[in-house]
């Protein structure tokens, strides 16, 4: 058998028969240059692997992960704290989305499509008491999915949620903030209504990313922090040791 | 397989799939885009019955790479730098050396033809057997062996050439 690069390469991969492998071992024992060549080929593998390992040691692509999350518990938006929450924002508006944004948090703002008071009461109840990641049915065919909780620069608690109306076939993503004891609508985007859970989660969730980016003062609350706030009726001081990332 | 099962299995193979994409693309952002496209396609197309999911996923990934990414990619010039992620080194000189090493491998891989690069990605990085690779790519095992050997030889040549000059 001729001992060439091909044979040495197959030897490296343990793809030779026992006999052939034995022949290679014998040959290498006798011939330094073959041994050196084998080492060199092994080294190239090693360098490529190290390179891939290095590049792989970065957060997994979250959009791909979002496509695969079927579990309601993972319907929160996974924001990578290692990258920081600012700057992860990409313009990701669904074609049908339009953002209606509250301008000014003070008095006298005009809001075009404010939820009627009974709907708002129902929404507020969920935001006040329920964890992110589970959808809740609130009156006739409407499902509310709280997605994440964060504090804004005024120290107020805010939550993003999706609201899907199965009767009307409409859907929206919105943010409300807790002022005093009241939840108030701050931003909303209409998004494409879809039956498909995965695509709704993956693309619609990000319609308000640019708004989040401006509002957030720190990374969103973890599930545990959120539970603590829910239990305490939002009375705990926002935890300043949460990673504040720039 | 139900949609939920498929997603769970895809979730499990996401790390090796991503490594494969990185091996092919040479940058994390390109690789992540490739992973995204691959997952989308895997979710929407039916998988053949007689094939393992990971083999199918690699096949789909590689096909997308060849169609979409390689066609767009401009031949890397000597000055192009690989996207550097955070390294463990605190020392600046170490960091620079490390960056140069990564860059070198990136250049070395970039000069391989597609079919050889795929071989390196599947065997040297992923550790698949020749038979598995033959199944994924639809080529004889003899072809796997010869292409892989050429790929390694070409890489070795590149590294040798670089070290002689520096």
Image: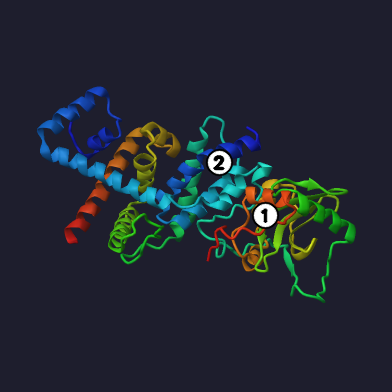
| Residue A48 versus residue A17 in the image, above or below | below
Which x, y percent locates residue B26?
Answer: 40, 55
Please tell me whether residue B123 is drawn above or below residue A90 in the rendered image: above
Q: CA distance from mark 1 to mark 2?
A: 22 Å
List x then y, in percent, for residue A169: 81, 53
Look at the numbered disc 2 and give the secondary structure of its residue. helix
Pinpoint the chain carrying mark 2: B
| Residue A152 vs residue B154, the one in the foreground | A152
Work out whether residue B65 or residue A212 is closer to the camera in this orientation and state it: A212
Q: Residue at x 31, y 41 (%)?
A: B148
Where residue B100 is drawn, which disc sits there?
Answer: none
User: Is residue A96 left or right of A6 when viewed as pictured?
Assistant: right
On-image quarter of the C terminus of chain B: bottom left
Q: Nearer the viewer, residue A52 or A136?
A: A136
Camera sees residue B59: no
Residue nearest the viewer, comparing A22 with A130: A130
Q: What residue is shown with label 1?
A: A148
Q: Residues within 10 Å of mark 2 (few under 14, many from 20)?
A: some
Residue B24 horizontal side relative to residue B161, left or right: right
Q: Quadrant of residue A95?
A: bottom right
Say which chain tag 1 marks: A
* In this view, the mark in front (1 or 2): 1
Q: Which residue is mark 2?
A: B11
- Mark 1 touches mark 2? (CB < 8 Å): no
In the current view of this chain or complex, which residue is farthest to the top?
A19
SS label for mark 1: strand
The way the protein has been coloured in the rendering is rainbow
**Which percent across, then down, holds residue A10?**
28, 34
């Amino acid at each position: 058998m001729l001992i060439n690069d091909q044979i040495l390469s197959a030897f490296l991969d343990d793809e030779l028969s026992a006999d052939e492998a034995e022949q290679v071992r014998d040959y290498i024992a006798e011939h330094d240059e073959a041994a050196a060549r084998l080492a060199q080929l092994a080294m190239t593998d090693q360098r490529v692997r190290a390179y891939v390992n290095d590049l792989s040691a970065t957060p997994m692509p979250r959009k791909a992960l979002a496509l695969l999350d079927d579990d309601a518990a993972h319907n929160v938006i996974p924001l990578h704290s290692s990258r920081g929450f600012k700057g992860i924002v990409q313009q990701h508006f669904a074609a049908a989305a339009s953002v209606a944004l509250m301008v000014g948090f003070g008095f006298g703002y005009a809001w075009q499509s404010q939820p009627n008071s009974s709907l708002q009461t129902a929404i507020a109840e969920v935001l006040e008491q329920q964890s992110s990641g589970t959808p809740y049915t609130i009156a006739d065919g409407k499902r509310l999915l709280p997605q994440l909780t964060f504090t804004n620069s005024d120290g107020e608690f805010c939550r993003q949620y999706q609201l899907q109306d199965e009767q009307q076939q409409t859907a929206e993503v919105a943010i409300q903030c807790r002022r005093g004891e009241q939840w108030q609508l701050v931003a909303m985007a209409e998004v494409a209504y879809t039956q498909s859970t995965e695509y709704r989660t993956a693309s619609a969730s990000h319609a308000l990313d640019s708004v989040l980016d401006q509002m957030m003062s720190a990374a969103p609350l973890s599930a545990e922090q959120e539970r603590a706030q829910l239990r305490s009726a939002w009375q705990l001081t926002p935890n300043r040791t949460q990673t504040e990332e720039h | 397989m139900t949609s939920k099962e498929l997603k769970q299995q895809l979730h499990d193979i996401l790390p090796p799939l991503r490594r494969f994409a990185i091996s092919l693309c040479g940058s994390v952002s390109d690789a992540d885009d490739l992973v995204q496209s691959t997952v989308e396609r895997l979710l929407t197309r039916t998988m053949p019955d007689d094939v393992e999911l990971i083999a199918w996923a690699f096949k789909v990934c590689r096909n997308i790479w060849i169609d979409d990414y390689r066609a767009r990619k401009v031949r890397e010039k000597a000055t192009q730098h690989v996207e550097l992620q955070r390294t463990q080194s605190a020392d600046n000189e170490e960091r620079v050396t490390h960056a140069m090493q990564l860059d070198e491998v990136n250049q070395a891989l970039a000069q391989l033809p597609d079919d050889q690069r795929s071989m390196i990605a599947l065997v040297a990085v992923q550790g698949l057997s020749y038979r598995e690779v033959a199944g994924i790519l639809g080529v004889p095992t003899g072809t796997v062996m010869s292409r892989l050997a050429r790929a390694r030889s070409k890489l070795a040549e590149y590294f040798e050439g670089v070290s002689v000059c520096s």
